[in-house]
Image (cartoon, rainbow, N blue to C red):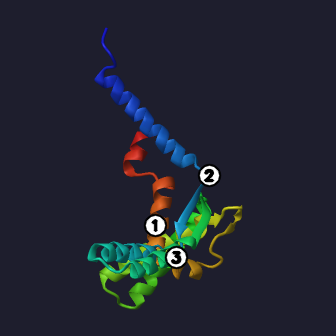
Amino acid sequence: MGGITEKQLDVVEKEGKAADAYLKLNRKNLDIDVPKYLGTVRQLEGYLAEAEKQGYSAEEVDKIEQKLKEIKKEQIVASFVSLSAQDLIHIQAFVAEAIKRSGESDFDTEVRLFMMLRAEQCATIWLALRKREDHSKRYFGRMEDTVLSDDETLRELAKLYKENFVLTEEERKNL
């Protein structure tokens, strides 16, 4: 008697991937903790690594470490919720507005693409990010508050949302 065949392993793997996709589809919320100023955190971590490598004085290293601790204390403590069909329509409207405005301003193609991507990211975050203690309230009160957030923080939030709520092409095929 042999063990598990290659075909059986493939079936188990495919079923596991399908189960993961269903979990994404049915996820109601996801609690997150992300630094409010992630760009500054990463920059200070780079300075700290450089300071240690270059042999800066202990006092200078301590200053950087202290500033890093202060900045890391400011966290976005919230929850992502799944988006409704109406939310998706709102996101499309934000992207359409970005397309219209970029066309009126005669921007380069790269700038137009950036505006579309940023509109989609900000709208998704604004609509999906909620106060952890009350999911009926948005974390950011206004769309403008979302747009004015740290760039790296926005990218990290968008990445977290995508990883936990949006199916990849492969995941769609596995369903």
Q: Nearer the viewer, mark 1 or mark 2?
A: 1
* Residue with the mark numbered 3: 71
Classed neighbour count for the residue bearing mark 1: other residues with Cα under 10 Å, few (<14), some (14–19), many (≥20): some
Secondary structure of residue under mark 1: helix
Could you give the CA–CA distance between mark 1 and mark 2, rounded to whole angstroms? 20 Å
Secondary structure of residue under mark 2: loop
Q: Nearer the viewer, mark 2 or mark 3?
A: 3
Residue 18 location (% of width, % of height): 45, 38
Classed neighbour count for the residue bearing mark 3: other residues with Cα under 10 Å, few (<14), some (14–19), many (≥20): some
Could you give the CA–CA distance between mark 2 and mark 3, rounded to whole angstroms? 30 Å
For the point 40% across and 73% down, the residue is 42
What amino acid type is highlighted by mark number 3? Answer: Ile
For the point 39% across and 43% down, the residue is 173
Q: Earlier in the sequence, mark 2 or mark 3?
A: 2
What amino acid type is highlighted by mark number 1? Answer: Glu
Residue 69 location (% of width, % of height): 51, 73
From this viewpoint, which residue is outermost toward the front? 58
Q: Is 31 on the left-hand or right-hand side of 55?
A: right
* Residue with the mark numbered 1: 156
Residue 87 location (% of width, % of height): 59, 65
81 or 50, which lies in front? 50
Res 96 seen here: no
What amino acid type is highlighted by mark number 2? Answer: Lys
Discs 1, 2 touching: Cβ within 8 Å = no
Could you give the CA–CA distance between mark 3 and mark 1, rounded to whole angstroms? 16 Å
From this viewpoint, which residue is outermost toward the left? 54
For the point 45% across and 55% down, the residue is 163
Q: Which mark is residue 84?
A: none
Classed neighbour count for the residue bearing mark 2: other residues with Cα under 10 Å, few (<14), some (14–19), many (≥20): few
